[in-house]
Amino acid sequence: MFNALVVNKDDEGKTSAAVESLSLDQLPEGDVVVAVEYSTVNYKDGLCIGPGGGLVRNYPHVPGIDFAGTVETSEDDRYKPGDKVVLTGWRVGEVHWGGYAQKARVKADW
């Protein structure tokens, strides 16, 4: 289990954010699991935590448009456990779950 800032949207369209405990199988599909060590706060993150500003497509959602951390597991030969990585772009934190969590699973190409 790990902690993540999860944004939810109710039936009336109101969003709310709270720290929740998640399991690895709740992470989206991907090739690389990263233990997130750092993330920043950006204008887009504020939009995603609030009503979404049209950036968030699916709820629940984990914002955080960037992160840095250490690879825990990888199904891609380019990344090995222990590798330090940085991810920015690819609509992570907007369309895809982002770095406001202790763990992230992402596509290796990102």
Image: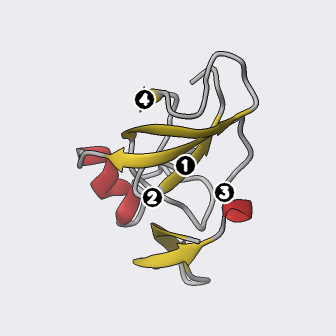
The earlier-in-sequence mark between 1 and 3 is: 3
The earlier-in-sequence mark between 2 and 4 is: 4
Q: Is residue 63 left or right of residue 72?
A: left
Amino acid type indicated by mark 4: Lys
Question: Label 4, label 1: how many angstroms apart (C-alpha)?
Answer: 13 Å
Amino acid type indicated by mark 1: Ala
Residue pointed to by mark 1: 104
Disc 3 vs disc 4: which is toward the camera?
A: 4
Whether residue 24 is visible to the viewer of this picture, yes or no, is yes
Identify the image quadrant of residue 51: bottom left
Residue pointed to by mark 2: 102
Q: Is residue 33 above or below residue 28?
A: above
SS at badge 1: strand
Q: Is residue 46 above or below residue 17?
A: above
Residue pointed to by mark 4: 84
Most distant residue in the top direction: 78
Amino acid type indicated by mark 2: Gln
Query: In percent of the image, x 45 and y 58: which residue is there?
Result: 102
Q: Position of residue 71 (x, y in %)?
A: 54, 36
Q: Position of residue 110 (x, y in %)?
A: 56, 24
SS at badge 3: loop
Query: In percent of the image, x 66 and y 57: which residue is there?
Result: 27
Residue pointed to by mark 3: 27
Question: Label 3, label 4: how many angstroms apart (C-alpha)?
Answer: 20 Å
Which numbered marker is on residue 1?
none
Q: Is residue 14 left or right of residue 45?
A: right
The 10 Å Cα crowd at callout 2, few under 14, some 14 to 19, many 20 or more, is some
Question: Label 2, label 4: how many angstroms apart (C-alpha)?
Answer: 15 Å
* Cβ–Cβ under 8 Å for marks 1 and 3: yes
